[in-house]
Image: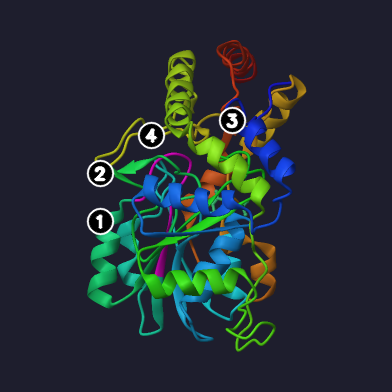
Amino acid sequence: MVMVNEPLLNGNEKKYINECIDTNWISSEGPFVKKFETQMAEYIGRKFATACSSGTAALDMAVSSLELQEGDEVIIPTFTIISCAQALTKLGVRPVLVDCEYDTFNMKVGDIESKITSKTKAIMIVHIFGLTVDIDPVLDLAKRYNLKVIEDAAQAIGQDYKNKKCGSFGDISIFSFYPNKLITTGEGGMVLCDDDSLDKRMKSLRNLCFGPQRFVHNEIGFNYRMTNMQAALGVAQLERIDQNVEKKRWIGKTYNGLLQDLDMINLPVKSTNYCENIYWVYAITLRDDFPKTAKQVMSELGKYKIGTRPFFYPMHQQPVFNKARLFLKDKLPISKKLYEKGFYIPSGLALTELQMEEVSELLHKVLI
Ligand SMILES: *Cc1c(COP(=O)(O)O)cnc(C)c1O
């Protein structure tokens, strides 16, 4: 079986985890948590970082910190993970959806302005599959309309936008360290910002909003703390971020060569005016005239033990939101088509050249 995403834990992971056990520091009070936060903030070029239990938790904290009111609106892409939308709907805030570009999978930045209303309070940008959102025009809009920007850079750890690190843009940025991300802590996430009081707020939200007087609370928070063991993994992983980025780009380049003769599929875009693909996953789409759906192709590859994943199911079609009468009038055809045509093939950091050749051979067999 070639797994769709296998992580690589070949640095100091074991050594640092052993340190946690040997010293009995296993909770979030242990020293690796602060170390991981400081080192990530420095690597990304942000002042403050708050490690937490997942990327989803990080989005919850980021959105909660904005102190939005029920009925407020936040503009987000429709082609993303549900975590982005549920962080808003839980608070009674309305996600306003923007379609994506067919080739880069990222939100159509040109469509944002027409969605801004008097209730709009923020824009959430999400980098998808290895290419970035075109951030500068979003920052311009945010400035003109006085909106906050949240950057979800979960899939873009180590990626640059115009030679500046993803996760350094907007008011608040977040990462996930799930095992398929560029560095992993097993489960984990992080919120970053440059504002001291915002950072204090994140740390309070992460830890149940304890007041100055222990066990007296003026506000409701979360327990989204990261353990010392997770952070130990993170510190070891971050030591290897440059190699990980290089490996992802090598995987992308190798597949580009192996699959270039398959004219029934579109290969990922190599670069845009503002970024070089980091190939977080190697995402392909079937050409319009190809008779099978992505679902059929994925199922045939599965029979040959090649792991694949479908694309995001567009937010405006999510049954859970439609049941709540959300997005019923949204027409966002590009993301809808992407879901039908697209899937990704094994692209984890542990992938070998031999495995890629096997994937290519079987992809040829299934498609031709
Ligand atoms: C993975 C991911 C998340 C969620 O992270 P978890 O750690 O799995 O909760 C959020 N946003 C994006 C874009 C992601 O890819």
Near-viewer residue (76 or 198): 198
Horizontal side of 308 relative to 68 (left or right) equals: right
Gap between marks 2 and 1 measured at Cα: 9 Å
Residue that label 3 marks: 12
If you read the primary sequence from the N terminus, does the residue marked by circle 2 or circle 4 appear first? 2
The local secondary structure at tag 2 comes to loop
Q: Closer to the observer: label 2 or label 4?
A: 2
Residue drawn at point x = 67 percent, y = 46 percent: 229
The quadrant the C terminus occupies is: top right
Residue under numbered circle 4 = 277
The picture quadrant where one finds residue 256 is: top left
Residue at the image position 29 percent from the left and 70 percent from the top: 142
Identify the mark nearer the N-term, 2 or 1: 1
**Tag 1's secondary structure?**
helix
Residue under label 2: 162
**Three-letter code for the amino acid on which mark 2 is drawn:** Lys
Asked whether residue 131 is drawn in magenta, I would say yes
User: As displayed, is residue 138 above or below residue 24?
Assistant: below
- Find the distance from the CA under tag 1 to the CA under tag 3: 37 Å
Find disc 1 in the rendering and name its residue.
Answer: 136
Could you classify mark 3 by the number of other residues whose Cα lies within 10 Å: few (under 14), some (14-19), or many (20 or more)? some
Numbered range of the magenta stretch = 123-133
Across and down, in percent, residue 319 comes to: 69, 64
